[in-house]
């Protein structure tokens, strides 16, 4: 499969726990993006990487969120001390610079 | 003002009609514009992109860009029930999305 892979597909966690999601982009894509989407809304930008460098992080993103792309390949998104408001679909996408995105299937997070 | 605004709809058209979806944006320096389709429960998928003023056609889809007025639109000709989805407008290479317009094509 040469698409964007996300793992896990679903995650249920208790409030206050930490969670980590993984994204494997298309191998030749140097840009990787994280978005969050809730029902009835468009994807909300969280952060993006060009190779291993994190170039932009949404100012709406609290300090509980952190993302890494250590070798310019896969990326992880960690949410610490989860809250119920973090429940959403977390989407990863990759692209080459200036081109449209290819999205992964997403990780659906439910915080109970 | 939001960076990208779309009429959230829902928009309903009969099968075979033309569906017109509109998007306005605030960043006058934006150079690239994208339309995505998102079926319920699925991830967005790229339909079209446009960089230059005017029209760009791809099959039943036409994207129209007017940079002076800061709007971009998507026309779907001969609409089919399978076109029923949410259509997302995205602006700039680092992708700010609108909230999407939900389209229903009725048989």
Image (spheres, helix red, strand yellow):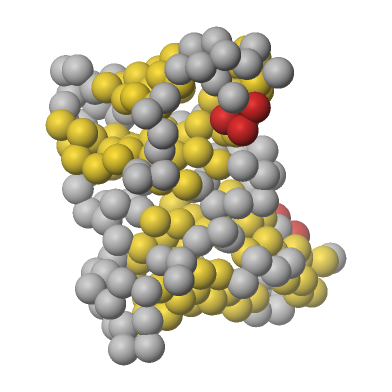
What residue is rendered at 24% in x and 43% in y? A56
Q: Where residue A23 appears, x then y in whole percent?
A: 38, 22
| Point 15% across, 31% down: residue | A53
Is any part of residue B92 visible from this angle? yes
- Using the image, determine if residue B54 lies above or below residue A12: below
What x and y, as percent, mark residue A54?
21, 34
Question: For residue B18, which quarter of the picture?
Answer: bottom right
Check the image and name the residue furthest to the bottom. B68
Question: Is any part of residue A103 visible from this angle?
Answer: no
Q: For the point 54% across and 25% down, which residue is it?
A: A107
Residue drawn 67% across and 51% down? A40
Name the one closer to the observer, A49 or A85. A85
x%, y% of residue A22?
40, 18
In the displayed structure, would residue A50 be above or below residue A67?
Answer: below
Name the foreground residue: A72 vs B80: A72
Seen from the viewer's position, the closer of residues B92 and A25 is B92
Q: Is residue B49 above or below residue A36?
A: below
As drawn, B39 above or below A91: below
Residue B92 location, quadrant:
bottom left
- How many marks are shown on the rendered structure? 0
Considering every residue shown, the one lying at the far right of the view is: B107
Give the left or right position of residue A26, taking residue B41 as reference.
left
Q: Is residue B35 left or right of residue B68?
A: right
Image quarter in which the N terminus of chain A is found: top left
Q: Position of residue A49 (x, y in %)?
A: 23, 35
Viewer-proximal residue among B87 and B107: B87
Q: In which quadrant will I find the C terminus of chain A?
A: top right
């Amino acid at each position: 499969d040469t698409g964007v892979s996300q793992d896990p597909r679903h995650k249920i966690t208790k409030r206050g726990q930490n969670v980590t999601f993984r994204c494997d982009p298309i191998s030749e894509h140097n840009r990787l993006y994280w978005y969050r989407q809730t029902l009835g809304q468009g994807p909300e930008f969280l952060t993006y990487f060009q190779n291993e460098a994190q170039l932009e992080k949404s100012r709406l993103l609290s300090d509980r969120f952190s993302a890494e792309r250590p070798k310019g390949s896969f990326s992880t998104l960690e949410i610490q001390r989860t809250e119920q408001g973090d429940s959403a679909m977390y989407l990863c996408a990759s692209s080459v610079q200036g081109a449209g995105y290819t999205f992964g299937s997403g990780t659906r997070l439910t915080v109970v | 003002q939001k960076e990208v605004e779309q009429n959230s709809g829902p928009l309903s058209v009969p099968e075979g009609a033309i569906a017109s979806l509109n998007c306005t944006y605030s960043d006058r320096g934006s150079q690239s514009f994208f339309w995505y389709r998102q079926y319920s429960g699925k991830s967005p998928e790229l339909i079209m992109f446009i960089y230059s003023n005017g029209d760009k056609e791809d099959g039943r889809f036409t994207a129209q860009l007017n940079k002076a007025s800061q709007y971009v639109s998507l026309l779907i000709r001969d609409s089919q029930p399978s076109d029923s989805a949410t259509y997302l407008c995205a602006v700039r290479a680092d992708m700010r999305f609108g909230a999407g317009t939900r389209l229903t094509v009725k048989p």
